[in-house]
Image: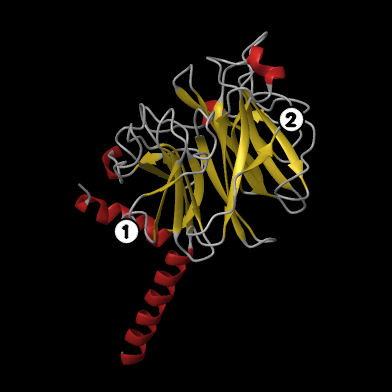
Amino acid sequence: MRHFILSSIVLLFILSCNRQEEEVYMFSYFKDNGQDGLHLAYSTDGLKWEALNNDQSFLQPQLGNERLMRDPCIIQGKDGNYHMVWTVGWNEKGIGYAYSSDLINWSEQQYIPVMEHEEQARNCWAPEVTYDETTQLYYIYWATTITGQFPETDSTAESNYNHRMYYVTTPDFQSFSETKLFYDAGFNVIDCTIKKSSDAYLMFLKNETLKPEPEKNIWLVTAESITGPWSKPTQTITGDYWAEGPTAIQIDGTWTVFFDKYRNHNMGAVQSEDLENWEDISSQVSFPEGTRHGTVFMVPQKVLDDLSTGTKLIK
């Protein structure tokens, strides 16, 4: 009898450990204009998403003149913490940053003045953060319009926003490199996000060109280094609709890119096994009502369990 009880305890312990080691999909997003802060949803298959915390905010924005939290990008860093960057306002010269060990309790919010040195900078939109194993640095990159720069594409812009991508690096989110130009392929570009495949860096981006014919679609470029040089964009991976805010992950070995069909007021997705032929699977995905774009990432089952039970304490 004693042996049976001990065996049962060991089995339960093993099952508990296995459950903690399992991972689920998490999606960070904003709603409306981003005024109420960070929202989170989870999925067990990467396609059907359920809101956490009754779709209430996990973190209220405190930075910038407008106090917004748009485009929340979250990754798990080498230190085990979840690091988040976001857009703090429509016309700010910096971005927001905070970190958390559990996605519930967050650090003090930090304003990173990445474009304060540029007098003609108009904005800092949709920052993303990627940890690069090769350089052992975090790369933070975003879209900015600097008035008077890149006049060759001024006529293609919307409301005189003529964006290029800029970046800084940091080993610890305390010290930062000087800001540099990250990506200029001769067109108006925003919403870049980077993933590493087995043999290349993949960057999904939005072609923001409006005139003479609108692009407003998602493209893929590749490189051997996180800073390029990047391949020439050759074809869009999205369909006959306006799309923005791509975020990518592999689901059962298949690359899946989610994005915001912002004119249709819903989310979409495409999939590819070879990064060349893309299938639109928008009809197979579902997100909480009002979801705007953000980031897909993985978390241990225990993090989801804690989010599900602990969020009742969040005000």
Q: CA distance from mark 1 to mark 2?
A: 44 Å
Q: Is residue 311 left or right of residue 91?
A: left
At label 1, the amino acid type is: Asp
User: Which mark is on residue 72?
Assistant: none
Which of these two is toward me, 294 or 119? Answer: 119
Q: Is residue 79 left or right of residue 307?
A: right
Around disc 2, counting alpha carbons within 10 Å, would you say few (fewer than 14), some (14 to 19), or many (20 or more)? few
| Residue 293 point in image, percent of width and height | 47, 33
Instruction: Place residue 235 in its image quadrant.
Output: top right
SS for dot 2: loop
SS for dot 1: helix
User: Which mark is on residue 306?
Assistant: 1
Q: Is residue 230 left or right of residue 131?
A: right
| Residue 199 point in image, percent of width and height | 77, 52
Which residue, given by chain and number where applicable, does mark 2 sit on? Answer: 185
| Residue 4 point in image, percent of width and height | 35, 86
Mark nearer the N terminus (1 vs 2): 2
